[in-house]
Structures are given as C-alpha cells and as structure tokens.
Image (cartoon, helix red, strand yellow):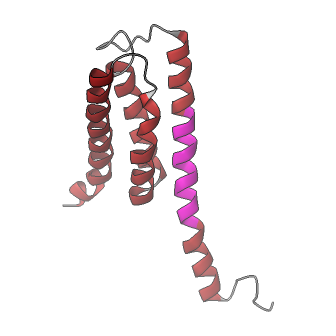
C-alpha cells in the first residue's frame, strides 16, 4: 500500500503531461502551421505543483518537454528539433517550467512554517 501512495504523484504527473500532449497534438493537427503550443503545458504543471509539490512538477516539466519534442515539433515522431527557433523555445519553456514548479511549491511551503512558528511563540510579534 505504501508503494501505491509513493507512486501516485508520479503517475498523476505523467498522466497530466500525456493528456496535455494529446490535446495539444490534436490542436496542432487541426490548426496546422507554426503554433507555439508548448506554453499551454504550464497550466497543468502548476496544478501538479500545487497538488503534489515541486519535485513532482519538475518531473512533469521534463516529461512535457520530451513529449513536446516528440509530438509537436518538426520532424514529428522524433526527438530531433529541426528549427533553431523551436529548439530555443523548448529550452526556454523547460527553464521557465522548472522555475515555475519551484516557485509554486515554495509559495505553498512558507504558510505552514509560519503557522508553526506562531504556534510555538517564535513569530515576529513574540517577546524574547
């Protein structure tokens, strides 16, 4: 049972990246042409960061980057990215997603530590 609890965030992160990839792939096939769809991965990754924390969101970002390189950039069904502009976009997205995952996870953490400090009397208004 403990193994399932530990695997749940990883499975959810990979499922979210897969579902987002499927939707973006369908949009790419429908609209065609040059679309900058990779940045739509940021919303599902923020959700994963809020629900499961930073490391899981970083895993989701890495999976999304690989999925985008394979399914969304020419040549399709290859990890090779032909255009230097697309490669730069992929690198920029990966960096932004990793920073966003870390910041989202850190935004949730200080509230808990601040509450603990106030409960123990170590807050900013406590008398020393």
Measured along the vertical axis of the image, is residue 52 above or below residue 114? above
Dividing the picture into quarters, in which one does residue 65 lie?
top left
Q: Which residue lies furthest to the bottom in this view?
A: 127
Q: Where is residue 14 in the image (x, y as percent from the top left)?
A: 30, 40
Dividing the picture into quarters, in which one does residue 71 lie?
top left
Number of numbered discs:
0
Measured along the vertical axis of the image, is residue 15 above or below residue 67? below
Q: Residue at x 52, y 31 (%)?
A: 93
Label the magenta part by its dominant secondary structure. Answer: helix
Q: Which residue is drawn at 33% across and 38% down?
A: 17
Q: Position of residue 78 (x, y in %)?
A: 33, 12
The front one of 122 and 53 is: 53
Q: Which residues fall within the magenta stretch?
A: 95-109
Q: In this view, does 6 lie to the left or right of 1?
A: right
Q: Is residue 31 magenta?
A: no
Q: Position of residue 100 (x, y in %)?
A: 55, 46
Which quarter of the figure is the C terminus placed in?
Answer: bottom right
Q: Residue at x 51, y 39 (%)?
A: 97
Measured along the vertical axis of the image, is residue 4 above or below residue 64? below
Q: Residue at x 32, y 52 (%)?
A: 9
Q: In this view, does 7 lie to the left or right of 48?
A: left
Which quarter of the figure is the N terminus placed in?
Answer: bottom left
């Amino acid at each position: 049972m403990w193994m399932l609890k530990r695997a749940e965030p990883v499975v959810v992160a990979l499922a979210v990246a897969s579902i987002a990839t499927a939707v973006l792939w369908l949009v790419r096939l429908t609209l065609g042409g040059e679309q900058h769809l990779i940045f739509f991965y940021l919303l599902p990754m923020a959700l994963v960061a809020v629900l499961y924390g930073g490391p899981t969101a970083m895993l989701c970002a890495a999976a999304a980057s690989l999925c985008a390189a394979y399914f969304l950039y020419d040549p399709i069904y290859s990890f090779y990215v032909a255009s230097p502009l697309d490669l730069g976009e992929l690198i920029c997205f990966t960096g932004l997603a990793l920073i966003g995952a870390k910041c989202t996870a850190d935004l949730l953490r200080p509230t808990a530590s601040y509450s603990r400090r106030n409960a123990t009397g170590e807050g900013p208004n406590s008398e020393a």
